Image (cartoon, coloured by chain):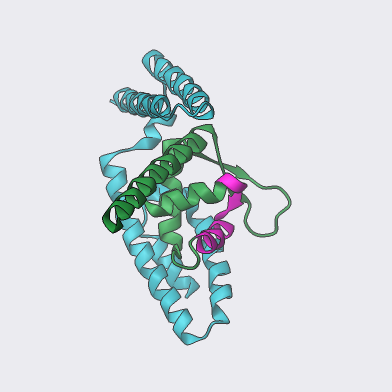
């Protein structure tokens, strides 16, 4: 799973968002390190829609962006698996550092 | 700047433009407004990122279009495709159950089964198109 995809899933795990809100939340999540361009964002969104991990829907009563995205059950499951994988890697890395320093 | 963005969007495949172009332009305009206050350096960095993002994105979309058409899976779904769809839904439910019970090995198994069922569904869609 690429970092942009992971960040999109993490952002949508909190609540549904439209494109610009996703862009800003991802920048905030990564503490300014990741700034997705429009092309990169929508390439990732299209792939996630094709994978069936997110859904697109129309938000009522908005002046600009009507299309928003939300995480579905499959996407939530994939996100949890990825976070679990990263937790295991982090624990393994920490154990190795401790062993090396000991 | 908006005109340049719209021109570059035309590099994308038609189906991607139909689905996302208007939305991408709105997002670009909002991002452009936000970066205007940051000065020339910020604006230049933003413009370069958007330009390269569109060029690379268009290339990736054309590559995806020719190597794997995921859109076909959403059109006609014959009997075997219906079975694949049921497998997908079943494995998603089992994956959710496994995760909620901290059975991550089981969850990974069902995630793998779900991925295989999606591939079968895409193949069914491709076969239906002939």
Residue at image x 33%, y 63%? B55
Residue at image x 33%, y 28%? B119
Total tally of numbered discs in the picture = 0
Side of A67 relative to B24 (left or right)? right
Residue at image x 42%, y 49%? A5
Q: Quadrant where the C terminus of chain B lies? A: top left
Q: Is residue A1 visible?
A: no
- Residue in the foreground of this view, choosing between A33 and A54: A33
Task: Give the quadrant of residue B57.
Answer: bottom left
Chain for colour green: A
B57 over B7 or under it: above or below: above
Residue at image x 48%, y 61%? A30
Q: Which residues are magenta?
A: A13-29
Q: Is residue A30 magenta?
A: no
Q: Colour of chain B?
A: cyan
Magenta stretch secondary structure, dominant: helix
Residue B105, percent across and down?
Answer: 38, 27
Furthest residue in direction front, as rendered: A102
Side of A61 relative to A80 (left or right)? right
A45 over B32 or under it: above or below: above
Residue B66, percent across and down?
Answer: 27, 43
């Amino acid at each position: 799973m690429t970092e942009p995809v992971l960040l999109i899933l993490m952002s949508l795990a909190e609540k549904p968002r439209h494109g610009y809100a996703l862009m800003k939340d991802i920048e905030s999540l990564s503490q300014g390190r990741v700034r997705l361009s429009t092309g990169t964002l929508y390439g990732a969104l299209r792939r996630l829609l094709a994978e069936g991990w997110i859904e697109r829907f129309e938000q009522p009563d908005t002046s600009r962006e009507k299309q928003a995205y939300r995480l579905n059950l499959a996407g939530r499951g994939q996100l949890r698996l990825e976070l679990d994988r990263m937790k295991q890697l982090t624990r393994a890395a920490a154990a190795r550092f401790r062993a090396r320093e000991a | 700047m908006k005109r340049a963005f719209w021109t570059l969007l035309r590099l994308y495949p038609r189906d991607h433009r139909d689905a996302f172009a208007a939305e991408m332009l709105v997002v670009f305009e909002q991002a452009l407004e936000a970066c205007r206050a940051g000065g020339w350096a910020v604006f230049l960095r933003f413009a370069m990122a958007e330009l390269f993002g569109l060029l690379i994105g268009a290339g990736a979309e054309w590559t995806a279009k020719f190597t794997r058409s995921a859109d076909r899976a959403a059109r006609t779904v014959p009997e075997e495709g219906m079975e694949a769809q049921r497998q997908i839904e079943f494995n998603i439910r089992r994956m959710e159950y496994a995760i909620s019970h901290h059975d991550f090995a089981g969850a990974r198994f069902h995630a793998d089964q779900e991925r295989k069922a999606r591939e079968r569904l895409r193949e069914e869609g491709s076969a239906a198109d002939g």
